[in-house]
């Protein structure tokens, strides 16, 4: 069996130049499939709010929901590192809250690391969580939990704003994060950050020169027919496949084709196993 991925995998990849891969998962069955792909880490993202719970944004996601889904994902994973998002207001209010909630994602959710959004403003929280022996992945650039403050979901770090991005990245690194997600920033700004940081950058909408990439699996499989960001490559039309299978099932039942004789039990088989 392949070796379990850890923070050391991330540090080694930065040194060797191996590109890191991450995908999201929110439940046991998908976590098993994602893990089997050989991905380095699985993020139980608070995108849960959008793609699983049907919310317009990530703001209403709770600690209880994150723990519930992280536990399901962790149960399905053997090799990938499991990283869980700290949801909105679980770490911004105070440093003790941040440490306690990060700990809950490990203790109750069985994650190996937590991710939180922000740079300079949340450096004290990152430092305290790391001091409690909990690995932290930062998240800078477009930080969806701040969508109201940012005036919507917009590309960040353009022009002079690149300086702010760099300050945020440095603050996250100096606070002790083992890696940082860089979301929706110009490719040249992300490349510059990647050159300057000694921790790996994981890009999403941040061009090809980050140390790794992450995608929300609903986007890359065509499962989410809401807004499709420019940076997503659609690897499969799983949504189309699923719609077709469901419609065929409905048609088969209505036409009396399913269940067929091969799906039925006859009297002498009554005591045989179901599967
Ligand atoms: O919640 C999430 O899925 C994320 C990724 C988009 C990085 O934070």
Image (tube, rainbow, N blue to C red):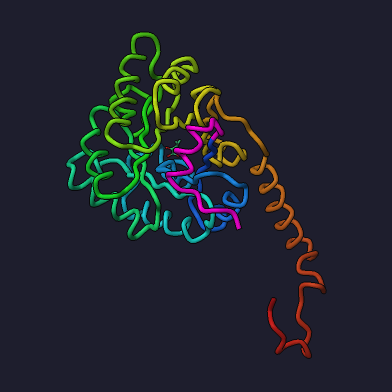
Q: Can residue 53 be seen?
A: no
Relative side of 108 to 19, left or right: left
- Closer to the camera in the image, 246 or 24: 24
Indicate yes or no whether the magenta region holds residue 80.
no
Residue at image x 40%, y 28%? Answer: 198
Q: Which stretch is magenta?
A: 1-19
The spot of residue 134 in percent (x, y) is 31, 48
Q: Residue 225 appears at what percent x and percent y?
A: 57, 36
| Residue at the spot 33% in from the left edge and 39% down from the top edge | 116
Residue 13 magenta: yes
Q: Residue furthest right?
A: 261
Q: Quadrant of ligand 1?
A: top left
Image: 206 above or below 257: above
Q: Is residue 198 above or below residue 133?
A: above
**Quadrant hosting residue 162:** top left
In the displayed structure, does residue 200 sit left or right of residue 225?
left
249, above or below 85, in the image: below
Given residues 149 and 264, the one toward you in this image is 149
Q: Is residue 81 visible?
A: yes
Task: Classify the position of the N terminus by image quarter.
Answer: bottom right
Q: Quadrant of the C terminus?
A: bottom right
Residue pushed farthest top? 159
Residue 117: give x, y in percent of width and height: 33, 34
Looking at the picture, tell me which residue is in the foreground, 41 or 131: 131
Residue 227 spot, x, y in % from top left: 52, 30
């Amino acid at each position: 069996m392949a070796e379990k991925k850890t923070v050391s995998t991330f540090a080694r990849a930065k040194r060797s130049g191996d590109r890191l891969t991450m995908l999201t998962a929110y439940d046991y069955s998908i976590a098993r499939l994602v893990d089997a792909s050989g991905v380095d880490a699985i993020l139980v993202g608070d995108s849960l709010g959008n793609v699983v719970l049907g919310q317009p944004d990530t703001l209403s996601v709770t600690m209880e929901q994150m723990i519930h889904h992280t536990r399901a994902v962790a149960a399905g994973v053997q090799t990938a590192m499991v990283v869980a998002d700290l949801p909105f207001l679980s770490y911004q209010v105070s440093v003790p809250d941040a440490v306690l909630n990060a700990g809950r994602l490990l203790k109750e959710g069985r994650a190996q690391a937590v991710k939180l959004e922000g740079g300079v403003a949340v450096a004290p929280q990152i430092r305290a969580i790391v001091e409690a022996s909990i690995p932290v992945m930062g998240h800078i650039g477009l930080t969806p939990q701040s969508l109201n403050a940012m005036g919507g979901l917009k590309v960040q770090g353009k022009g002079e704003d690149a300086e702010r991005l760099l300050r945020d990245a440095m603050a996250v690194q100096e606070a002790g994060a083992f890696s940082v997600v860089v979301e929706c920033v110009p490719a040249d700004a992300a490349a510059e950050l990647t050159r300057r940081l000694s921790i790996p950058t994981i890009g999403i909408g941040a061009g090809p020169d980050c140390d790794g990439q992450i995608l929300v699996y609903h986007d890359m499989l065509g499962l989410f027919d809401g807004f499709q960001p420019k940076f997503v490559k659609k690897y499969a039309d799983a949504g189309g496949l699923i719609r077709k299978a469901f419609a065929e099932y409905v048609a088969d039942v209505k036409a009396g084709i399913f269940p067929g004789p091969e799906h039925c039990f006859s009297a002498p088989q009554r005591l045989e196993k179901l599967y």
